[in-house]
């Protein structure tokens, strides 16, 4: 890392996130005066207003330029989606974890102008007013969360198109699509025309935004006394004048072109998972090779540019979240997740020289943003995997590892073309998608242990006494375990029905009221179809529901089967009474449930059979339902920080877990229940037919000593290859001792830079809530293979 | 008393659960103990079952074993991990309670009829880490010809806690753990005999 990068990196780390009111103000100003009746054109004009008016920021010594806000970590708000109340702003400012500084001026502006204008008009207001009473009751009970209540659907990744084409080329494509509109035979022609006009406005807007950076850089160059910096600023000006209007000509322009597109996407709306360049190594490789070949680039300058690029991601915290959304995703990380390696569209190995350089950058930068992962196929060389393992061993949670061969199978199973599947990968935490061609939207987490709790109480939520489920039988009268499982699946179907109905309404709200014409220009086939990203314009449209706590569910079902029905150690009345009392006065029973029950994660078929049954039920109840965009619903197993929130609303569970404690996360076994080592864990997890999910998240924790030396790397690599041979989707590692974590809890000031793997992302340990810290400490620490 | 009674088929079921890992890493089943030859028929049956399933087998032994039993296992064992502690018979007798005559004889015979034997040398400070023992041990092993590798296992205290938890008396006196300088000194001496020496393993 050279001096420039060191400085930029440190600045990024030292800058505290705050709220910038600039976007809210510009957006309000626009809407106050706009009389545009077409939704896509209104959104396009709003985008144009932002791009033409927002503050341009070029920092000292930067090479890659552009910020979402007026300055690094000055975080905009999106009042058209979610207008924060003064109380929200106070909470954001005051909360201990993930705060955003809010100044008096912003508060005043909100009070006088933003709130009066937006209250009642935001998507959040409209969304909740459109939801049924039963939807709200289940939402408030913590059965599921709703991703779109404060943020826009995004969850997507770019392919290679911006490296082949500039926005002038996209404009020509749009013009071409307009020419082909057939008003005589296509009843949608007018709607398509408006969408295409909106896209054209957005193309001009992003070109103008880049040009404003060029102007600023030129102006700065004129006043710059340092000749070297003057030259750099002049180069920045040239780059910004050329891209993204045109296709980039070199490595620098390629990175800058992407960055403008990234800023466009995350300024247009507060898209989930921000945005991501996807297969950066594959996309940049032609520029890298050309640059090295003609002497315009060296390995060192490529590294420097990449590292400058890395800092830009870290400068953009996730937009401020409040309420349930803040609980399910309590982090500054905004989930841009760089894919390294993988396959080429023709099926050949995608690992190249730049893949290794990018791994070096990841290693050296040690930033929580962007997140990174290695895409491992059976064709990937061991050297590649082992270089990844070396970084993992350093213990800050990156990169995670994905099984490309399974990802391709997952996508093809969903009906996608094999070339599109191979040029896909993962985004966010573990979500599979066809890059540049798919809208794959996460709609909310689903609380599996809560649904079991409701099934054990005839449809009533014992926490509130409210009946929110369907009527299922009295469990004390059940004669077999099958009746328990039936009651569970009935309640599951009941809540999935409610959730899907809600999502089908919410999809329409975004399609009709909150289109994203800028994002639409860069995702195939929105231009060709004349349809918006939020309205089924992409080639593929998938809607995900994400079950949480399958480990806790499996162990709970297993405990009921084993102790109540098979061994008859307990009657159902006793079991329910024990749970109702939260084990108080029943510690002996709790010890039996916790210690003397087969548990998921130990390669024990007794428990794992119920894992498989639960997985299959979820698949059959959710997958394949039609969404409103020509695509389908599917399941995805990740939990971010939602297992903490969901745990807080679930009483004691039959696996011996106390009330309100966290649930298991991702598809990982219950924390501490996997006692037979990592090989048994992956055998168990692989019993799910993972090709039928859109992603599964497996966390493993290792003692640092276990991974020492070349042998440690070899063993880890073998473990990963074995899991992938068994068709596992993803695995990520924490390499840290519980001792270290406890010490960090006790003396946070000494462990400010301790980064751990949380869910599908890494975060500063000290930024995590206490419950989440405890949960990570409680995860099983493997001390041998 | 911990443990449970199992049949050959029970053990094999457990062994086969890890097939995927044997295939991936070139691993297999390792039979250790205690001393696995304490149950010679059971061990023999397991070894044969593994071979039938093409599973790589390793046996860890202290060598204080009936020679015929040991030699009968040869066709079914891919790798022997053979403990060698002390060469001087008197010292051996003092610390282990038995003569090492059989142990040395078995090792000599085994090395003649089996190609893959690794000698494991636990370094216990004050017991067998003196120069004389190290040199004699190196000399003996190198004289066998077919044994190419010695794994040096420095004394550790992982068992101390275990004794406590099991409520058992730990008769091992407290000794200082061998320093890395001491260990590398021993490694160097053994390497002097042309042997491949690994620490740990």
Image (cartoon, rainbow, N blue to C red):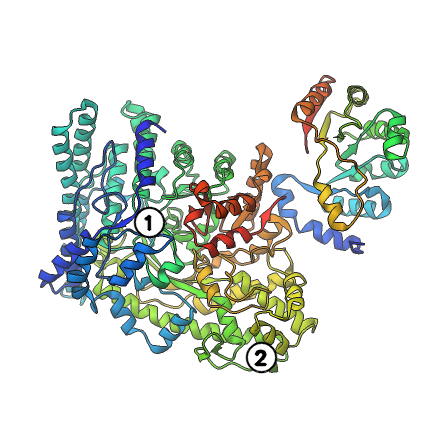
Marks 1 and 2 sit apart, C-alpha to C-alpha, by: 46 Å
The residue at the far top in this view is B192
- Looking at the image, tell me whether mark 1 or mark 2 is earlier in sequence order: 1
Q: Is residue A575 found left or right of A353 in the rendered image?
A: right
Q: Is residue A751 found left or right of A116 in the rendered image?
A: right
Q: Nearer the viewer, residue B139 or A486?
A: B139
Number of numbered discs: 2
Badge 1: residue crowd in 10 Å (few <14, some 14–19, many ≥20): many
Tag in front: 1 or 2: 2
**Which secondary structure, mark 1?**
loop
Q: Is residue A426 visible?
A: yes
Q: For the point 47% across and 72% down, which residue is it? A: A492
> Which of the image's four quarters has the N terminus of chain A?
top left
Q: For the point 17% across and 36% down, which residue is it? A: A242
Badge 2: residue crowd in 10 Å (few <14, some 14–19, many ≥20): some
Q: Is residue A390 found left or right of A561 in the rendered image?
A: left
**Which secondary structure, mark 2?**
helix
Chain identifier of the residue bearing label 1 in the image: A
Tell me the number on the disc at residue A157. Answer: 1
- Please say if A322 is above or below A174: below
> Which of the image's four quarters has the C terminus of chain A?
top right
> How far from the left and from the top, in percent, is residue B51?
75, 43
Residue B2 falls in image quadrant:
bottom right
Chain identifier of the residue bearing label 2 in the image: A
> How far from the left and from the top, in percent, is residue A646?
45, 64
- Identify residue for label 2: A475
- Please say if B42 is above or below B109: below
> How far from the left and from the top, in percent, is residue A58?
20, 37
């Amino acid at each position: 890392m050279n001096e420039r990068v060191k400085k930029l990196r440190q600045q990024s780390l030292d800058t505290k996130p705050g709220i910038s009111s600039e976007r809210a103000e510009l957006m309000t100003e626009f809407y106050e005066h706009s009389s545009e009746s077409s939704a896509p054109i209104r959104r396009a004009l709003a985008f144009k207003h932002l791009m033409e008016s927002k503050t341009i920021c070029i920092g000292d010594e930067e090479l890659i330029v552009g910020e979402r806000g007026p300055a690094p970590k000055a975080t905009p708000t999106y009042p058209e989606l979610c207008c924060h109340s003064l109380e929200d702003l106070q909470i954001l400012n005051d909360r201990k974890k993930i705060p955003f500084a809010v100044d008096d001026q912003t508060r005043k502006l909100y009070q006088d102008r933003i709130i009066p204008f937006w209250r009642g008009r935001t998507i959040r207001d409209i969304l909740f007013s459109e939801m049924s009473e039963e939807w709200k009751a289940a939402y408030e009970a913590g059965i599921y969360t709703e991703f779109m209540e404060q943020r826009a659907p995004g969850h997507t990744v770019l392919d290679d198109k911006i490296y082949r084409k500039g926005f002038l080329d996209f404009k020509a494509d749009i013009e071409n699509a307009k020419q082909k509109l057939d008003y005589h035979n296509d009843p949608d022609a007018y709607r398509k025309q408006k969408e295409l006009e909106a896209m054209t406005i957005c193309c001009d807007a992003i070109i103008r935004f880049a040009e404003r950076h060029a102007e600023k850089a030129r102006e700065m160059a004129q006043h710059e006394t340092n000749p070297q910096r003057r030259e750099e600023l002049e180069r920045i000006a040239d780059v910004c004048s050329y891209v993204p209007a045109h296709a980039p000509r070199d490595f620098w322009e390629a990175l800058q072109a992407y960055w403008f597109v990234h800023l466009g996407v995350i300024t247009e709306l507060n898209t989930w998972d921000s945005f991501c360049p996807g297969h950066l190594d594959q996309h940049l490789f032609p520029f890298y090779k050309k640059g090295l070949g003609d002497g315009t680039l060296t390995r060192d300058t490529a590294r420097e540019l990449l590292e400058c690029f890395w800092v830009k991601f870290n400068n953009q915290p996730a937009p401020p979240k409040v309420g349930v959304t803040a609980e399910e995703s309590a982090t500054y990380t905004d989930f841009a997740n760089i894919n390294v390696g993988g396959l080429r569209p023709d099926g050949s190995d995608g690992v190249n020289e730049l893949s290794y350089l990018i791994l070096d950058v990841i290693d050296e930068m040690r930033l929580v943003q962007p997140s990174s992962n290695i895409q491992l196929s059976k064709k990937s060389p061991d050297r590649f995997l082992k270089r990844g393992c070396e970084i993992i061993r350093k213990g800050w949670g990156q990169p995670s590892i994905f099984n490309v061969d399974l990802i391709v199978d997952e996508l093809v199973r969903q009906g996608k073309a094999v070339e599109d599947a191979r040029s896909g990968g993962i985004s966010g935490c573990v979500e599979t998608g066809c890059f540049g061609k798919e809208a794959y939207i996460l709609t909310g987490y689903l609380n599996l242990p809560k649904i079991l709790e409701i099934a054990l109480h005839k449809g009533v939520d014992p926490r509130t006494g409210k009946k929110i489920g369907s009527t299922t039988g009295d469990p004390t009268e059940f004669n077999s375990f099958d009746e328990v499982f039936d009651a569970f699946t009935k309640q599951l179907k009941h809540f999935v029905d409610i959730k899907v109905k809600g999502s089908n309404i919410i999809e329409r709200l975004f399609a009709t009221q909150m289109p994203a014409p800028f994002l639409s220009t860069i995702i195939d086939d929105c231009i060709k179809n004349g349809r918006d990203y939020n309205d089924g314009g992409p080639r593929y449209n998938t809607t995900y529901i994400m079950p949480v706590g399958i480990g806790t569910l499996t162990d709970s079902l297993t405990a009921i089967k084993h102790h109540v029905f098979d061994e008859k150690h307990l009657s159902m009345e006793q079991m329910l009474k024990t749970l109702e009392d939260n084990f108080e006065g029943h510690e002996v029973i709790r010890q039996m449930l916790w210690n003397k029950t087969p548990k998921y994660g130990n390669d024990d078929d007794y428990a794992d059979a119920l894992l498989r049954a639960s997985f299959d039920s979820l698949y059959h109840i959710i997958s394949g339902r039609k969404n409103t965009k020509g695509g389908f619903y599917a399941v995805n197993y990740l939990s971010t920080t939602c297992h903490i929130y969901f745990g807080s609303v679930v009483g004691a569970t039959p696996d011996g877990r106390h009330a309100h404690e966290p649930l298991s996360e991702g598809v990982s076994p219950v924390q501490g229940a996997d006692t037979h080592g990592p090989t048994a864990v992956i055998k168990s997890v692989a019993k799910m037919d993972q090709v039928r999910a859109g992603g599964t998240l497996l966390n493993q924790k290792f003692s640092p000593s276990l991974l020492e030396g070349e042998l440690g790397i070899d063993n880890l690599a073998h473990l990963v290859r074995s899991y992938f041979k068994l068709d596992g989707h993803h695995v990520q590692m924490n390499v840290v001792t519980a001792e270290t974590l406890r010490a960090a809890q006790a003396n946070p000031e000494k462990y400010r830079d301790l980064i751990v793997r949380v869910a599908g992302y890494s975060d500063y340990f000290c930024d995590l809530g206490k419950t989440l810290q405890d949960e990570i400490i409680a995860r099983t620490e493997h001390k041998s293979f | 008393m911990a443990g449970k009674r199992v049949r050959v088929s029970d053990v094999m079921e457990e062994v086969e659960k890890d097939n995927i890992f044997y295939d991936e890493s070139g691993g297999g089943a390792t039979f250790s103990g205690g001393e696995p030859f304490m149950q010679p028929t059971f061990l023999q049956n397991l070894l044969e079952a593994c071979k039938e399933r093409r599973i790589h087998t390793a046996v860890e032994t202290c060598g204080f074993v009936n020679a015929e039993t040991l030699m009968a296992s040869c066709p079914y064992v891919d790798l022997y991990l053979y403990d060698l502690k002390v060469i001087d018979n008197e010292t051996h007798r003092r610390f282990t309670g038995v003569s090492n005559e059989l142990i040395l004889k078995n090792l000599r015979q085994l090395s003649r009829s089996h190609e893959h034997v690794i000698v494991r040398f636990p370094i216990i400070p004050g017991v067998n880490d003196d120069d004389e023992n190290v040199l004699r041990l190196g000399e003996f092993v190198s004289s066998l010809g077919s044994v190419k590798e010695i794994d040096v296992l420095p004394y550790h205290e992982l068992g101390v806690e275990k004794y406590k938890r099991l409520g058992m008396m730990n008769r091992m006196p407290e000794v200082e753990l061998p320093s890395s300088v001491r260990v590398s000194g021993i490694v160097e001496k053994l390497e002097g005999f042309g042997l491949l020496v690994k620490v740990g393993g």
